[in-house]
């Protein structure tokens, strides 16, 4: 499984751009999928935080500095929502084809 390690600076406005793909490596177009919302979230037994993301086609942009997390490394999920997926569908995260780790620094 590919592991995407992303650095993030807490409280900063750095934009991270992620290319989204299906399990077979084909770009996953969120517009075509009818996405109404996209988020990146961290949920561990001790920490939980979510930030909203924007997208254009298969490119998602997110400001990970908006996650209110102390310095450390956190597994994260990229989720999109639509009329047919109102509870969200995980596109990347722990246990999925692509996993994401966010390295939060001060």
Image (cartoon, rainbow, N blue to C red):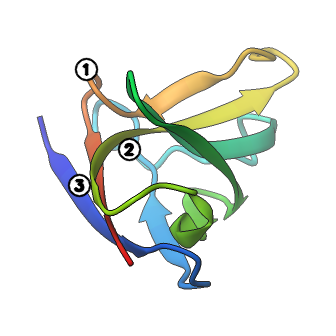
Q: Position of residue 65 (x, y in %)?
A: 54, 71
Q: Earlier in the sequence, mark 3 or mark 2?
A: 3
Estimate how packed mark 2 is, as few (under 14), some (14 to 19) or many (20 or more) residues with alpha carbons within 10 Å: few
Q: Between disc 2 and disc 1, whose residue precedes?
A: 2
Q: Which residue is mark 1?
A: 95
User: For the point 22% across and 59% down, which residue is it?
Assistant: 5
Q: Secondary structure at mark 2?
A: loop
Residue placed farthest to the left in the image?
Answer: 1
Instruction: Identify the secondary structure beneath mark 1.
Output: loop
Of the image marks 1 and 3, the number of the one nearer the N terminus: 3
Name the mark on residue 26. Answer: 2
Pick whichever, 62 or 60, lies toward us. 62
Query: Which residue is the site of mark 3?
Result: 4
Left or right: where 75 falls relative to 27: left
Q: Nearer the viewer, mark 2 or mark 1?
A: 1
Instruction: Identify the residue at horizontal 55%, vertical 80% (top origin).
Output: 15
Residue 66 in the image: x percent, y percent? Answer: 62, 65
Q: Residue at x 40, y 72 (%)?
A: 8
Between 70 and 100, the residue placed more toward the observer is: 70
Front residue (pair 89, 28): 89
């Amino acid at each position: 499984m590919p592991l995407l390690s992303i650095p993030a600076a807490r409280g900063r406005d750095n934009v991270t751009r992620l290319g989204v793909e299906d399990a077979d490596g084909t770009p996953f177009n969120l517009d075509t999928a009818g996405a109404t919302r996209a988020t990146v979230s961290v949920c561990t037994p001790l920490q939980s935080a979510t930030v909203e993301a924007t997208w254009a086609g298969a490119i998602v942009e997110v400001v990970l500095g908006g996650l209110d997390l102390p310095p450390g490394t956190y597994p994260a999920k990229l989720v999109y929502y639509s009329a047919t997926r109102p509870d969200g569908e995980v596109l990347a995260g722990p246990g999925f084809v692509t996993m994401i780790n966010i390295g939060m620094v001060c």
